[in-house]
Image (cartoon, helix red, strand yellow):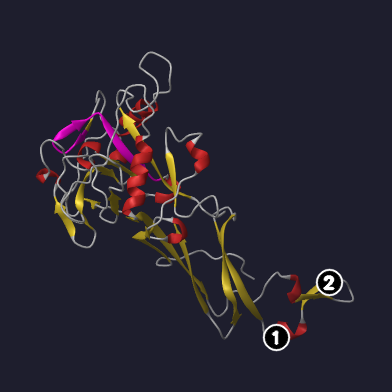
Amino acid sequence: MAFYKNFENGDVVFDNATITSGLFQDGGSSIDAFHSSSTQHTNTGDYNIDVYRYDPSSNASASVQFGVSYGHRDGSGSLGTKGATGDRTSAAIFGQFNNIINPAQTTNFTFGSITSEHFFAIVFNRARTRERMESGGWELHLGSGSFGAGASSGHVIKLIDDSSTSKGTGNTRSALGTPEYNVVSGSVANGVHTAAADMTSGTGSYGAFYPKLGVILLNPIALGGGVAAPVGTVGSALLGIPTVTGSNSDDRNALTFFKSIKSGSYFQAKREEDVTSRHYFVRAKSTEFNSTSNDSYYETTSAGTKRIIPGLASEQKTYITSVGLYNDDSELLAIAKLSQPILKSKSREALIKVKLDF
């Protein structure tokens, strides 16, 4: 009775595929409602605002979809002064992203034609993005809301990356920051509307996108006053998201940015991962695996010996319920369970495919 069988040439096949799926809770590829936690505002809200698809105060299953934050090289827009007391949270955030993304000795971020000392950030955690965000697969709408002076109430811009027209750049500190794409106006359905190079020299591009990091950095200068409304706007006025950069001042710029996302009411995003699959073709020929070591297959004689139940001895058959994969030391590495048993006998062969994804 054979317990183990070696695979032969052609029994093990490899293939590779890129799997795309929705990035948000419940497998959704887009959301149109955005919530934050009032509890977090009093704890870590100075550094980061967690954004939920469902209201965490009334839905126990609500989970964080992404975080938004604001970074400034000199700590402006947050409490504290350099060399004195205070957290200077915006400086800590700027330094964190600068260390991850920018080349050494860099003190500003480049958005198109300008360098900027501050930014808004959207960050997805690794558990949600898995391997990377899909380039060309996200679209964010930002609304002007009612921010007051300089803002244009009711206006919306649609932002995407320019991976459809650009291979991206690789001038970052780590491989995870490569490639880097520009954030531009447009839509997933219709493509780029205004390329980064066509933005005015005084504002630069809308930002930068890093798919492997799950990070979108947005340029406050381009999102503020003085920017002509691109595709997707209602009317022709400016978006005008205000960014306050007071010294030793709790200006809550991250909260302002969150309100703009909430006002836009739409975020589409997908994730990608490269999956290597190994297919094992398990072949049980007519003379193989027709008996088993399972106790139900045997009986004990009056003499105390163990024998195959007489009715099965003359016409041996088994039911295959699982397939075990072993290494050369007969150690079980994986087991595949069948959805229903397969009858195996001398008059029946079996071919079972086991697929492992990595």
Q: Quadrant of the C terminus?
A: bottom left
Q: Quadrant of the N terminus?
A: bottom right
Q: What amino acid type is highlighted by mark number 2?
A: Thr
State the SS at label 1: loop
Residue 205, percent from left and from top = 18, 41
Residues at marks 1 and 2 touching, judged by CB atoms closer than 8 Å: no
Whether residue 165 is situated above or below residue 308 in the rendered picture: above
User: What residue is disc 2 on?
Assistant: 305
Identify the residue shown where x is 10% and y is 45%. 198
Residue 256, percent from left and from top = 35, 40
User: What residue is disc 1 on?
Assistant: 314
Q: Quadrant of residue 301?
A: bottom right
Whether residue 140 is situated above or below residue 290 in the rendered picture: above
Whether residue 296 is situated above or below residue 65 in the rendered picture: below
Identify the residue shown where x is 58% and y is 52%. 329
Identify the residue shown where x is 36% and y is 29%. 90
Q: What span is in magenta?
A: 110-124
Q: What amino acid type is highlighted by mark number 1?
A: Ser
Residue furthest to the front in view is 149
Is residue 242 part of the magenta span, yes or no? no
Can residue 312 be spotted in the picture? yes
Is residue 114 part of the magenta span, yes or no? yes
Identify the residue shown where x is 29% and y is 50%. 143
What's the CA distance linking mark 1 and mark 2?
19 Å
- Dot 1 surroundings within 10 Å: few (below 14), some, or many (20 or more)? few
